[in-house]
Image (spheres, helix red, strand yellow):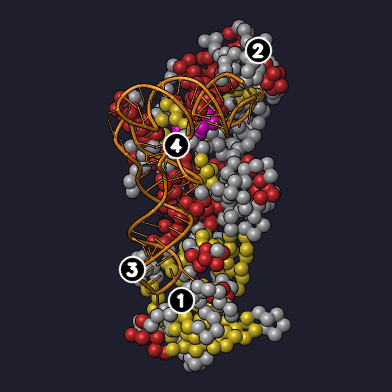
RNA sequence: UGGGGUGUAGCCAAGCGGUAAGGCACCGGCCUUUGGAGCCGUCAUUCCCAGGUUCGAAUCCUGGCACCCCAGCCA
């Protein structure tokens, strides 16, 4: 595929020309292990690993694990699984910010010795008050001018655990009057007597992200440190740190994070959906998480294609979820085997077809890829068709079955509806009586006869029962971003259909296998499937021109 | 309000002083034993607005306007 131009590649190209980093490209994906990855992270992963790939560089995976209160091992495992599934490899470069805690501590001591950092006894509230506002400068902390010796002593004792949580912080000494609030003596260390998932109880002071992040990039010799827009005005702080320390200086570049229509993307909200049981876990197929998309039936290829197609820029944007779905269909169309399955079965008896006869009809597995071959599908006197493929009173432009009308059963015969049986109570159609034209078997000369429509079917005697989970978008509003976001949830985002009828070849389908159910959509085998008791997830529908016509 | 950003079609997004790419969506048509796929076509006389520079401006300059981010001991 053609590589799409973007401003980051331009910067890298310029840097190559000026030999800024010796022509090297080294990026990293730095998640905090406090939740599962979502499609927005996928954009960043594809960007960082894609750049490394295209420029013959390297990309690291680094966990930004500086806050033990929120982080869990479960998340570090899921994140690695998701990055790998997306198709990227960090080889032996799996790092943790916590690997650098000792180094970071030394750096902090260096700053103290330079008179560029101090221990502050102000409470969190007081720090906030002293910070000032957008329009008024802040006030210096009373502890700002402590001697270097006292700072060194206090900081050492902070580390040793002599002080309670929240009682002191280490702050950098920059400028309390800076118009950039990030430069008003930001906190570097806080006291937190919490045990860390990797360092255990070794530390009771933990570096703030702002203090840890830039130095971590520096230690790893990252050339282009790519992050999202909200860190743009933290950059002067990161620059200040590496300059004061006199260490390797990566170039930070900010890009706009992904937003998707009909979706919430913040980790906080996704966590809430999980905790409040609006969905069944982080990998619920309705979630925009990588694991949710995977279970839903998305392919890594389709997500990478999506990342390429949305591009990278600095303007905040909300991408139409239809684009994601298009990428998925694009990929699945080329690779998914076609099968016939009936979600809402309607019994159809072919009156003039011989009793007890079974024909094995040849069906094409994928018209987009002849190499995928053909299979045999059993046909007999009684079949199921989709309830929606019959209308007693067909509307205009309806090309399917209705009384007296002919239609083709895919790969089989042309049939005509000659009778309709209804439930005497409800009036609901329960069975169709049809006749078939024995001359019109698919492949025979007579089969060329034109009929309005072709519908799918499954032989009743051979059908397998299955459960199908039909998903719809989780939110009804295009932009469920407001505070009332929970009221905007779609009450029908999951519909469970049981006793669906699928063709017998599906007996050997394995978990995660993907299929196109002809004329319906793409489906995959869910993890909940048991031997002889299949569960399918509807990944995405096929484009449905008829639904559009009918709606209009 | 001080600071930092961003404004090109319904949604993304190229463009970098030489006369508005591409994708999605939408709308037509062809084709089709999936109302799928594929193919063809339509879709910005104008780039947030107003001035200016220039033979020539989405691109350069000036001044506005709109939207987003920042006042965590979160990341």
Pair 2/1: label in front: 1
From the top left corner, tell me how far across and down residue B7 is, in percent.
47, 35
* Residue bearing the label numbered 4: A313
- Could you tell me how far apart the alpha carbons at marks 2 and 1 are, in whole angstroms? 78 Å
Q: Earlier in the sequence, mark 2 or mark 1?
A: 2
Pair 3/4: label in front: 4
From the top left corner, tell me how far across and down residue A457 is, in percent.
50, 77
Q: Which mark is residue A139?
A: 2
Residue at mark 2 shares a chain with residue at mark 3: yes
Pair 2/4: label in front: 4
Nearer-the-camera pick, B75 or A391: A391
- Packing grade of label 3 (10 A; few <14, some 14-19, many >=20) is few
Q: Earlier in the sequence, mark 2 or mark 4?
A: 2
Position of A487 compared to A455: left or right? Answer: right
Residue A352 visible at all: yes
Q: Which mark is residue A352?
A: none
Nearer-the-camera pick, A333 or B40: B40
- Packing grade of label 4 (10 A; few <14, some 14-19, many >=20) is some
- Could you tell me how far apart the alpha carbons at marks 2 and 3 are, in whole angstroms? 74 Å
- Could you tell me how far apart the alpha carbons at marks 2 and 4 are, in whole angstroms? 38 Å
Mark 2 in CB contact with mark 3 (< 8 angstroms):
no
Nearer-the-camera pick, A551 or A35: A551
Write down the region rendered in magenta: A225-231
- Which type of secondary structure does the marked residue at label 4 adopt? loop
Q: Chain of mark 3?
A: A
Q: Earlier in the sequence, mark 3 or mark 4?
A: 4
- Packing grade of label 1 (10 A; few <14, some 14-19, many >=20) is some
Mark 2 in CB contact with mark 4 (< 8 angstroms):
no
Q: Which mark is residue A370?
A: 3
* Residue bearing the label numbered 1: A453
- Could you tell me how far apart the alpha carbons at marks 3 and 4 are, in whole angstroms? 40 Å
Residue at mark 3 shares a chain with residue at mark 1: yes
């Amino acid at each position: 595929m053609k590589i799409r131009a973007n401003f980051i590649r331009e910067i890298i190209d310029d840097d190559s020309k000026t030999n800024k980093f010796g022509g090297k490209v080294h990026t990293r994906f730095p998640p905090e292990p406090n939740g599962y990855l979502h499609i927005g992270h996928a954009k960043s992963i594809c960007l960082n690993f894609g750049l490394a790939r295209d420029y013959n560089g390297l990309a690291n995976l680094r966990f930004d694990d500086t806050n033990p209160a929120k982080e869990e091992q479960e998340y570090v495992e899921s994140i690695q699984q998701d990055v790998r599934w997306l198709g990227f490899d960090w080889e032996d470069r799996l790092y943790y910010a916590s690997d650098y805690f000792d180094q970071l501590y030394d750096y902090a001591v260096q700053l103290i010795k330079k008179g560029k950092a101090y221990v502050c006894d102000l409470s969190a509230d007081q720090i906030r008050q002293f910070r000032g506002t957008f329009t008024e400068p802040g006030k210096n902390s009373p502890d700002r001018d402590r001697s270097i010796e006292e700072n060194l002593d206090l900081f050492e004792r902070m580390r040793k655990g002599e002080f309670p949580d929240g009682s002191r912080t280490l702050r950098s000494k920059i400028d309390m009057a800076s118009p950039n609030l990030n430069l008003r003596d930001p906190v570097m260390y806080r006291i937190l007597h919490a045990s860390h998932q990797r360092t255990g109880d070794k530390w009771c002071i933990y570096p703030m992200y702002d203090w840890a992040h830039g130095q971590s990039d520096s230690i790893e010799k990252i050339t282009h440190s790519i992050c999202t827009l909200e860190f743009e005005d933290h950059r002067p702080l990161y620059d200040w740190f590496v300059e004061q320390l006199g260490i390797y200086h990566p170039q930070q570049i900010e890009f706009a994070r992904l937003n998707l229509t009909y979706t919430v993307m913040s980790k906080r909200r996704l966590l809430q959906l999980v905790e409040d049981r609006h969905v069944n876990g982080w990998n619920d197929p309705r979630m925009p998480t990588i694991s949710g998309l995977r279970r839903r039936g998305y392919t890594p290829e389709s997500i990478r294609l999506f990342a390429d197609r949305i591009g990278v820029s600095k303007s905040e944007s909300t991408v139409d979820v239809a684009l994601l779905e298009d990428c998925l269909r694009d990929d699945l169309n080329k690779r998914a085997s076609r099968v016939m399955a009936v979600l809402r079965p309607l019994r159809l008896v072919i009156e003039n077809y011989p009793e007890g006869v079974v024909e094995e009809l040849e069906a094409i597995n994928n018209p987009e890829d002849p190499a995928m071959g053909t299979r045999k599908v059993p046909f007999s006197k009684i079949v199921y068709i989709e309830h929606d493929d019959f209308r007693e009173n067909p509307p205009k432009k309806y090309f399917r079955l209705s009384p007296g009308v002919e239609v083709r059963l895919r790969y089989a015969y042309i049939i005509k509806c000659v009778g309709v049986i209804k439930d005497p109570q409800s009036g609901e159609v329960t069975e169709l009586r049809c006749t078939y034209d024995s001359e019109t078997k698919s492949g025979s000369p007579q089969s060329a006869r034109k009929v309005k429509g072709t519908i799918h079917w499954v032989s009743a005697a051979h059908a397998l029962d299955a459960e199908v989970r039909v998903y719809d978008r989780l939110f009804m509003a295009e932009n469920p971003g407001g505070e009332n976001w929970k009221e905007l949830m779609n009450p029908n985002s999951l519909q469970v259909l049981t006793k669906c009828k699928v063709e017998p070849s599906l007996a050997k389908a394995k978990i995660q296998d993907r299929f196109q159910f002809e004329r319906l959509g793409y489906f995959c085998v869910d993890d909940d499937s048991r031997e002889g008791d299949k569960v399918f997830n509807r990944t995405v529908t096929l484009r449905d021109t008829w639904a559009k016509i009918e709606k209009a």
